[in-house]
Amino acid sequence: MTTLIINAIIVILVIAYAGMYNNLVKYRNRAREFSSQIDVQLKRRTDLIPNLVETVKGYAKHERETLSNVVELRNNVTNASSLQDKVKADSALTGALRQVFALAENYPDLKANQEFSQLMEELTNTENKVSYARQAYNSQVQAYDTAIQTFPRNMIAKIHGFTEMQFLEIPDVEKEAPKVKF
């Protein structure tokens, strides 16, 4: 009888251990998934930019510097190696895109151009998706970090090498009001 009770306790502990380990894996994988979603949306955004630049070029020939800056910043996003570097580069790109959108105010024909309007709408939608993906990533990182820091999961996390993940922080540049210069 005692052996049966001890075996039952061992089975329960093994099941609980496996459940906690599996939950840690689930939290970590979800955070990685949201990180990938940020990459997907940033890629989508950088793919839209050449079309936007070409459309604007036709209307705003003397705005080459602004457009060249957008292309350079787009390449910085594409070439960034870490998620945090991509977010920083994307923040700079966001500021440059605001200048391009402001150009539309000075060029009524551009503003009325259907292709430009569609590209602006696509970029706005993508911005919303990037924002959501960042928020979802940070929420999942918070859940994951909490899980690996609380007892008894913290012991399992330490044994299996689960480490804290970093939140995406908004660069100071993005917190400032945009400055549009012509």
Image: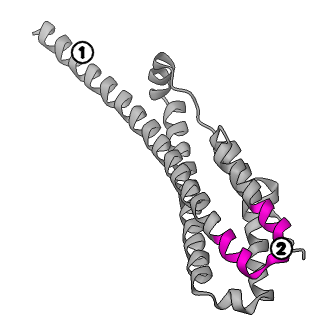
Question: Going 56% across and 54% down the picture, which residue do you hit?
Answer: 43
Query: Which part of the image, by quadrant, shows the C terminus?
Result: bottom right
- Alpha carbons under labels 2 and 1: distance apart: 72 Å
Q: What kind of secondary structure does the magenta stretch mostly adopt?
A: helix
- Under circle 1, the secondary element is helix
Q: Is residue 117 magenta?
A: no
Relative height, residue 90 to residue 105 (above, below): above
Relative height, residue 89 to residue 147 (above, below): below
Region in magenta: 52-70
Q: Which residue is mark 2?
A: 63
Relative height, residue 106 to residue 61 (above, below): below
Color encoding of the figure: one colour
Q: 140 or 148, which lies in front?
A: 140
Q: Position of residue 164 (x, y in %)?
A: 58, 32
Question: Going 58% across and 75% down the picture, which residue do you hit?
Answer: 119
Q: Which mark is residue 137?
A: none
Q: Position of residue 6 (x, y in %)?
A: 20, 11
Identify the mark nearer the N-term, 2 or 1.
1
Query: Which part of the image, by quadrant, shows the N terminus?
Result: top left
Question: Going 72% across and 48% down the picture, which residue do you hit?
Answer: 76
Q: Position of residue 138 (x, y in %)?
A: 58, 49
Q: Which mark is residue 10?
A: 1
| Disc 2 residue crowd, few under 14, some 14–19, many 20+, Cα 10 Å | some
Q: Amino acid at mark 1?
A: Ile
Judged left or right of residue 121, residue 8 is left
